[in-house]
Image (spheres, coloured by chain):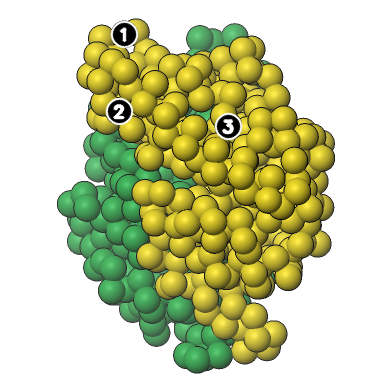
Chain colours: A yellow, B green
């Protein structure tokens, strides 16, 4: 899927919502624990109730790995289910990987060949050769961490390089632009730093941004849109816990839909106002 | 296992070798492909032939994830096999993880509870709250990336902070020392930068360093020892491809042993010379 195709999906669905499948065996409704694959059963219901409101799903690998091979099988089934039942969705492996070249190549093989994701989140610390192997797959994407939404973001991401005057996240944005195009790279930019989006948009006007941190982590969708929208929308805004754990009983998926719908309606208004739909 | 216990193992084995289990289904000897679990069969033979020469094993997660649930099952069996047959070995999940706090907590659950590793490699980009959840497990370790051995290390790790004058990897070393102790943290320092070890030892005299890049990546063991040894050895030097792919036929494990032995003998001399054994 390229950027234009993703924008087409956004216009069709009138939404730039990404649903984070941070599906924790210790938090999903109790009645699912008796099924043969509780994580998949949970994901399937969430997806069935929200697929028309979202353009992307983002399973976070940690939640599946914590169950070992069984969890990875739940992930595999989740991706296959989405591919079979709901084509057109953009699938992100939130994995934050990054290793020496040949190893990143293996992670790329894992996420793009074995699991058939569209994109994988990658940490920039190890530089170009840790990132580029993910871009050897046409139509697949790297989503590089730039400015994250957590408290620890301030430990290193704002350090200012004495030669260029750039903060570390700015160096990441600037240097990495030479590694791929706006059809093969996106960036993670935390919503808790919405005012930073203006600066970031000056550096990367065309790239899609994956924005976590709206909702549970405290960011505002209006602020994100105000500073982050570009001519092809250019935003995927993620919500995980606020949607998937909206309910805890048998009705959890309908409650998840209600929360997703609130966000989709707000997104539709934003897209209309920006004359993107 | 704490640092003293690890040092005791080093003295007992007269070795500070870590064998990297970068076990690639496309590179292991062909005769293993007919077995029910080729990656495990490969690892088992490598371990059986080298366990008395090494103090640590380091499976790289990418190689197992590239096979999906099946690969994770091979990893699970590998860890269990080492625990059952060869107690006293230090097991490192080379995963280079790092995410917001609750997610890092799930990765910790994966590697320490589910798989029963002793340590996991962690990327520092997201800062303190992405690292600390791994240290909530007594006796377990974080091995934080500081200076890596790949070409892309120069993209960001040397950027010099205009306030402190520290390069990024130095900021990582200095700031992270407050997050744990030399009994819960180690650092990855690439062997291709052996001359940098002197500076690094001034910042962290007591911590263990995990040093990749000896052999295939071009680093010298003598240089690493010269600048990196401390009073409890303080080094785990990793070799992956140089050992595990030493042979390609039915005799591969014996050939791996030969290569591991060459390194162990050199390490023994280094330890004797430093009067650590």
Q: Nearer the viewer, mark 1 or mark 3?
A: 3
> Which one is nearer the viewer's eye here, A12 or A154?
A12
Crowdedness near tag 3: few (<14), some (14–19) or many (≥20) residues, C-alpha within 10 Å:
many
- Residue placed under numbered mark 2 in the picture: A247
Decide: is B165 above or below B168. below
Q: Which residue occupies 76% across, 62% down?
A: A205
The answer to whether residue B271 shows anywhere in this view is: no
Crowdedness near tag 2: few (<14), some (14–19) or many (≥20) residues, C-alpha within 10 Å:
some
- Tag shown at residue A54: 3
Under circle 2, the secondary element is loop
Q: Earlier in the sequence, mark 1 or mark 3?
A: 1
Q: Position of residue A274 (x, y in %)?
A: 71, 52
* Chain hosting mark 3: A
- Residue placed under numbered mark 1 in the picture: A35
Q: Which residue occupies 59% across, 24% down?
A: A52
Q: Which residue occupies 81% across, 40% down?
A: A4
Q: Is residue B97 left or right of residue B116?
A: right
Q: Nearer the viewer, mark 1 or mark 2?
A: 2
Q: Is residue A168 left or right of residue A34?
A: right
Under circle 1, the secondary element is loop
> Which one is nearer the viewer's eye here, A32 or B245?
A32
> Which one is nearer the viewer's eye here, B139 or A255?
A255
């Amino acid at each position: 899927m390229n950027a234009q195709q993703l924008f087409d999906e956004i216009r069709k669905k009138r939404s730039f919502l990404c649903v984070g499948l941070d599906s924790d065996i210790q938090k999903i409704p109790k009645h699912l624990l008796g099924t043969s694959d509780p994580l998949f059963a949970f994901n399937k219901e969430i997806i069935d109730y929200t697929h028309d409101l979202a353009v992307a799903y983002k399973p976070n690998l940690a939640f599946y790995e914590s169950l070992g091979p069984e969890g990875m099988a739940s992930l595999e089934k989740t991706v296959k289910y989405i591919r079979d039942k709901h084509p057109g969705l953009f699938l992100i492996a939130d994995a934050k990987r990054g290793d020496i070249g040949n190893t990143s190549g293996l992670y790329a093989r894992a996420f793009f060949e074995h699991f058939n994701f569209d994109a994988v989140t990658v940490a920039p610390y190890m530089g170009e050769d840790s990132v580029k192997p993910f871009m050897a797959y046409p139509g697949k994407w790297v989503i590089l961490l730039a400015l994250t939404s957590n408290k620890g973001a301030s430990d290193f991401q704002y350090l200012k390089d004495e030669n260029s005057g750039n903060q570390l996240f700015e160096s990441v944005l600037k240097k990495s632009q030479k590694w791929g195009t706006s059809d093969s790279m996106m960036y993670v930019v935390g919503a808790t730093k919405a005012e930073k989006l203006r600066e970031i948009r000056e550096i990367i006007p065309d790239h899609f941004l994956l924005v976590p941190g709206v909702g549970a982590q405290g960011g505002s969708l209006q602020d994100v849109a105000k500073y982050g929208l570009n001519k092809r929308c250019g935003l995927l805004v993620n919500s995980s816990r606020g949607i998937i754990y909206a309910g805890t009983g048998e009705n959890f998926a309908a409650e998840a839909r209600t929360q997703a719908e609130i966000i989709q309606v707000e997104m539709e208004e934003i897209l209309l106002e920006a004359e993107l739909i």
